[in-house]
Image (cartoon, coloured by chain):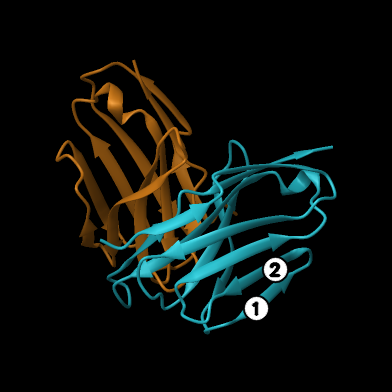
Chain colours: A cyan, B orange
Amino acid sequence: GQQVMQIPQYQHVQEGEDFTTYCNSSTTLSNIQWYKQRPGGHPVFLIQLVKSGEVKKQKRLTFQFGEAKKNSSLHITATQTTDVGTYFCAGPTGSGNTGKLIFGQGTTLQVKP
Amino acid sequence: DTAVSQTPKYLVTQMGNDKSIKCEQNLGHDTMYWYKQDSKKFLKIMFSYNNKELIINETVPNRFSPKSPDKAHLNLHINSLELGDSAVYFCASSRGQSYGYTFGSGTRLTVV
């Protein structure tokens, strides 16, 4: 079946360093979504990318969708302690309202102040 | 106003018991989901309902039975709880799987 893989599983950085997590799907995706889950919290939707090669920015966060629509990345510039959490990518299977989101395993980011 | 609310937030129970988790959304979304998050944070879909109809039923033991009385509610009943059922269960809603999901705050189930 369809798989969504994320690397790395964990990343420890010093505050101010950059961070990147990578997401790869075994199949072409119609869109890719990114979520953030703070420790003890629930996943929160960050963004959706739809077009091949699309790049979107949210302040220090840059999201990219690959040309083949099978991979994506999230880059955080100059990390802050508020960036701590687990970042998940997710891709849909099926179509319309009959499909489901398949989540990657997540990348847990720790930021040392 | 809480968009997707789940109760209870914590549930500690003994093996063999039956328990229910309730979920309600006030976003007007047509589709609701149950996801299970294990200790390694892996999120796995269990069920999906669209307008009260069961759409997705993953390979979940039949001890788990979802019920959707209307499109704003999706409850999860679990019979004969086992140790391996311990996890965080998230309810979510969306306009469809091509749209962002809104998750509830989760129910941490501990079976002892």
Give the letter of the chain under mark 1. A
Determine the residue positioned at 35% across, 59% down: A3
Quadrant the C terminus of chain A occupies: top right
How packed mark 1 is, by other alpha carbons closer than 10 Å (few <14, some 14-19, many 20 or more), is: some
Determine the residue positioned at 29% across, 22% down: B83
Quadrant the N terminus of chain A occupies: bottom left
> Is A98 located above or below residue B56 in the figure?
below
The amino acid at mark 1 is Val
Q: Residue A2 carries which label?
A: none
Residue B23 picture location, percent across and down: 40, 47
Q: Can residue A64 be seen in this view?
A: yes
Tag 1 residue: A55
**Marks 1/2: CA–CA distance:** 7 Å
Q: Which mark is residue A62?
A: 2
Identify the element where label 1 is drawn. Answer: strand
Give the letter of the chain under mark 2. A
Q: Can residue B30 be seen in this view?
A: no
Residues at marks 1 and 2 touching, judged by CB atoms closer than 8 Å: yes
Determine the residue positioned at 39% across, 32% down: B87
